[in-house]
Structures are given as structure tokens and as C-alpha cells.
Amino acid sequence: MGADVMNSNRVTAVLYRIFGVAALVLLALAAIESVVKEYKYTVVQERYEPGRLVEFAALAAVFAIAMLLRQIREELRKRK
């Protein structure tokens, strides 16, 4: 049982970091895309508007926050 919990915590921590980094990268890409569009160029080949990239970043951030809250809840349950 203990090994399963440790493995689950590691997977959750890795996924939390991946979603957090993805959210930051998408947010930066949206900012860059909006600036570059002013000069009539594009970074993402006009597949996604900057607002859509921000939506994807928010979605990734929500998942990262949910995983972080899950880790906090598990730690609080261990202390009781």
C-alpha cells in the first residue's frame, strides 16, 4: 500500500509540473502571438488565435491547481 501511494504522489507531482509549465508556455505563446500579429506575421500559422491559446493555458492551469490541491489534501489527511 505504501509503495502505491508514493508512486501516485510522484506521478501527480510530475503531472502537476507538466501542466504548470504547459500553462506558462501557452500563455507566453499567446502574448508573443498577439504582439507578432500587429506586424502581420504569425507564430502558430493562424491555427489558433491568441485568445484561444489563453483558454488552453487556463485549462492547463486549472488541472495543475486541482492536482496541487489533491496533494495538499493527502498531506493533511496524513497528519491527522
Image (cartoon, grey):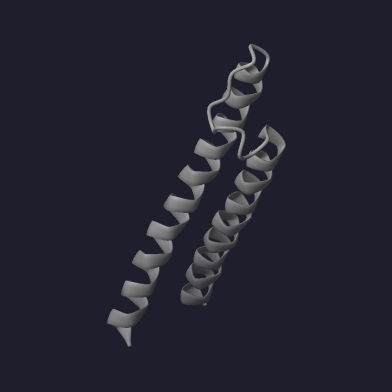
| Residue at 66%, 23% in the rendered image | 34
Residue 53 lies, with reference to residue 65, above or below; the image says above
- Left or right: where does residue 24 sit relative to residue 55? left
Front residue of 63 and 42: 42
Residue 52 lies, with reference to residue 60, above or below; the image says above
| Residue at 64%, 15% in the rendered image | 40
- Left or right: where does residue 59 sit relative to residue 28? right
Residue reaching furthest to the bottom: 1
Give how far across and how far down residue 45 sits, in percent. Answer: 55, 32
| Quadrant in which residue 51 is drawn | top right
Residue reaching furthest to the top: 39
Give how far across and how far down residue 17 sits, in percent. Answer: 43, 51
Front residue of 45 and 78: 45
Count of residue discs: 0
| Residue at 61%, 33% in the rendered image | 46
Give how far across and how far down residue 42 sits, in percent. Answer: 57, 24
Residue reaching furthest to the left: 3
Give how far across and how far down residue 12 sits, in percent. Answer: 43, 65
| Residue at 55%, 39% in the rendered image | 26
Residue 42 lies, with reference to residue 7, above or below; the image says above
Which quadrant is home to the N terminus? bottom left
